[in-house]
Image: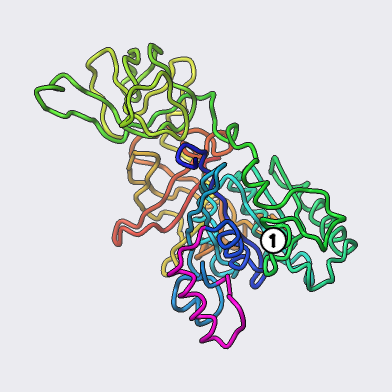
Amino acid sequence: MAGNSELLRFTTAGSVDDGKSTLIGRLLYDSKSIFQDQLDAVESATLRRGEKGINLSLLTDGLKSEREQGITIDVAYRYFSTPKRKFIIADTPGHIQYTRNMVTGASTANVALILVDARKGVQEQTRRHAIIASLLQIPHLVYCINKMDLVDFDQERYESIKEELENFSSKLDVQDVQFIPMSALNGDNVVERSKEMEWYEGSTLLYYLENVHIGSDYNLIDARFPVQHVIRPNTDEFHDYRGYGGRVAGGVFKKGDSVLLLPSGFKSKIAKIDTLDGELAQAFPPQSVTILLEDDLDLSRGDMIVRENNQPKVTQDLELMVCWFDSLKPLVSGGKYAIRHTTQEARCVIKEIRYKLDINSLHRNQEDLEICANDIARVVVRTTKPLFVDAYGKNRITGSVIIIDEGTNGTVGAGMIR
């Protein structure tokens, strides 16, 4: 049943030891998405640590260093499914020095789960991760007020934390904010409703994840198709076949639609939309398809198929909010890097660093412009060739870039186009 179901990506965040890994372990365990050998390995690891029962957090803390320290360092991706939906989970670190990992895990998420320890209340990292979720334009934000069993399932404590979070979240750019009191350790309100919190009338976490509407999270208005690969089978049967493969980044493409090709400016019509499973009448995000045109035109990787009356901005000057990843070299004005946008690659120079963002207060620091690992800054870059871009708030795919160190070929930054 899950074969044709919708895919939802969500990320977990929050302060250290708020129970993120335990929550994911509970979701996997209660939804029966754990293989027996995985369960055996976790039981053995729990026993070696001298703990009782099953430490569900060890299901996601896969790195040996994490299991030894009992913390999450890297982004751990996990997959599970229910009859209603398929899910990809990004379990991100809570420590301040791993902000870049949180940005990586959250960049493609539909939903952000931010955990709050009911005993400690709202922490600095709670605010930090909520602000990052807002910057990354994650449409749905769920505050999981965890460890309610350690405050005797006190409704007043929950309402107090909820009120503080509501006041804070009103300043953020998030469309949908939800609150769920839970105990990930015991499973209260994770998959099954809690008998200890009958005063809570909302849904369980899994019910919310299965039913939250994500169809409108994608931009279905602005048609964008970055060409990834030109498909020429060169066989006797398909000797005239010339298709353009890629993933739809925005809008809806239909057979017979008039389209414009960038950067050439030539016009054509869609003759056919192909997939491995057969021809489609229309294609929309995030489908991967092959588009065939009525005319034999020169189109290659990095080009984009759009509509004549709805085009992206074509520019070599970009204003970006950048999260810097490189722990060895800071981002400097005048620095030269490679830049990747959709399927295009170019070189770029940092023309100006406008300010560094204080992620706790949203204060713009224009004095300290040394941008080190995990810092977020507003910068202006100039590219060696025009890119076809939208604002990140309009389209998260055509509005984002990655910055690459040409010497090491390592990704040193992620940018959101403003």
Classify 65 as above or below 349.
Answer: below
Quadrant in which residue 260 is drawn: top left
Who's the residue at 34% across and 18% down the image?
A: 265
Q: Amino acid at mark 1?
A: Asn
Who's the residue at 67% across and 69% down the image?
A: 185
**What secondary structure is the magenta-colored segment mainly?**
helix
Give how far across and how far down residue 50 sits, in percent.
Answer: 57, 88
Way the structure is coloured: rainbow
Report the residue marked by disc 1: 360
What range is drawn magenta here?
Answer: 33-57
How crowded pointer 1 is (Cα within 10 Å; few <14, some 14-19, many 20+) is rated as some
Q: In the figure, is residue 47 to the left or right of 343?
A: right
Classify 106 as above or below 259.
Answer: below
Give how far across and how far down residue 381 sits, in percent.
Answer: 45, 45
Residue 135 magenta-drawn? Answer: no
Residue 321 in view, yes or no: yes
Who's the residue at 46% across and 67% down the image?
A: 36
Residue 358 in view, yes or no: no
* Quarter occupied by the C terminus: top right
Comparing 71 with 55, the one in front is 55
Residue at the right extreme of this rendering: 156
Comparing 282 with 1, the one in front is 1
